[in-house]
Amino acid sequence: MNTHSITFVGGGNMARSLIAGLVRQGTPAASLHVAEPVAELRDALRADFGVSTYASAAEAAAQGGVWVLAVKPQVMSQVCGDLTDLARQHSPLVVSIAAGITSAQLQQWLGGHAAVVRAMPNTPALLGAGVTGLFATSAVSAEQRAQADQVLATAGRTVWIEDEAKMDAVTAVSGSGPAYVFLLAEAMEAAARAQGLPADAAHTLVVQTLLGASRMLDESGEAPAELRRRVTSPNGTTQAAIESFQGDAFEAIVARAIEAATARGKALSAAND
């Protein structure tokens, strides 16, 4: 086993995006291994990136010192059970990108023989524009933290969280967050059409507005409240819209949504115990 080789257990969209990022940044394809039960996905990964692929998780995991567990949460226990003996022999770094699975659960299922990093990427990672929250257990060394960061940074920015209990909030804010933006875009497009704008114009106006506003948030270095203040002229059209939002308790609606998503994440974690 090469401690610097990386095994992906699961070859779906998120794994594929991370593999693409690693290869793009110069990681040799020979050091990347993927376990994927679907033959068509194995063939595509091998053809597109030159990585080694396997039908068996254990066979793939035997090749790498870093395991990226990219399977559905409902099968994670079974997958880890198949890797327990290997974990006992090699004490790998295990990076899980499954929502709602705690580090304690992963360590238990792997027999207590792995250094575990829990990661929560989001779907813009598929474009290399995501953000990932990361939590490391005390068994993870500084070098291993750097390894985990290197893998997830190929999908966008990374944020380390020191209290694992806050990972459910990470999931609620950024993991689920793209859906909130899509819902806003959906509502804005519908409202634009209701005002008589053609559908194609409404779509372009909404998408580019959200894209431009996001870039301003990212590149200006200013707080959201300050950017909002600058675009809101007294007694202008923007002020009318903002007052309508706030009259319907917009901030409270968002807060309740984040609370609901966080609570659901905690419940899912408890259900996996």
Image (tube, helix red, strand yellow):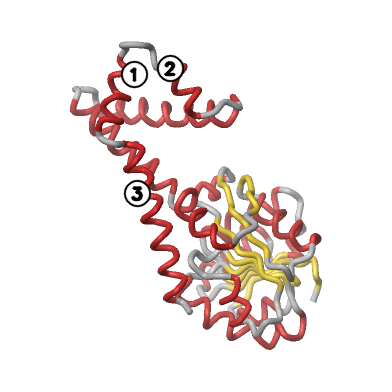
Q: Residue at x 56, y 80 (%)?
A: 79
Q: Earlier in the sequence, mark 2 or mark 1?
A: 2
**Looking at the image, is mark 2 or mark 3 nearer the viewer?**
3
Circle on res. 256: 3
Q: Earlier in the sequence, mark 2 or mark 3?
A: 2
Task: Estimate the spatial distance between the alpha carbons at disc 2 and disc 3, rounded to whole Å.
Answer: 26 Å
On screen, residue 35 versus residue 123, left or right, reads: right
Quadrant hosting residue 90: bottom right
On screen, residue 145 versus residue 231, left or right, reads: right
Residue 2 position within the rendered picture, expressed as x and y whole percent measured from the top left: 81, 72
Q: Quadrant of the N terminus?
A: bottom right
Foreground of the two, 82 or 266: 266
Residue under pointer 2 = 231
Residue under pointer 1 = 238
Residue 249 position within the rendered picture, expressed as x and y whole percent measured from the top left: 29, 36
Dot 1 surroundings within 10 Å: few (below 14), some, or many (20 or more)? some
Residue 102 position within the rendered picture, expressed as x and y whole percent measured from the top left: 55, 70
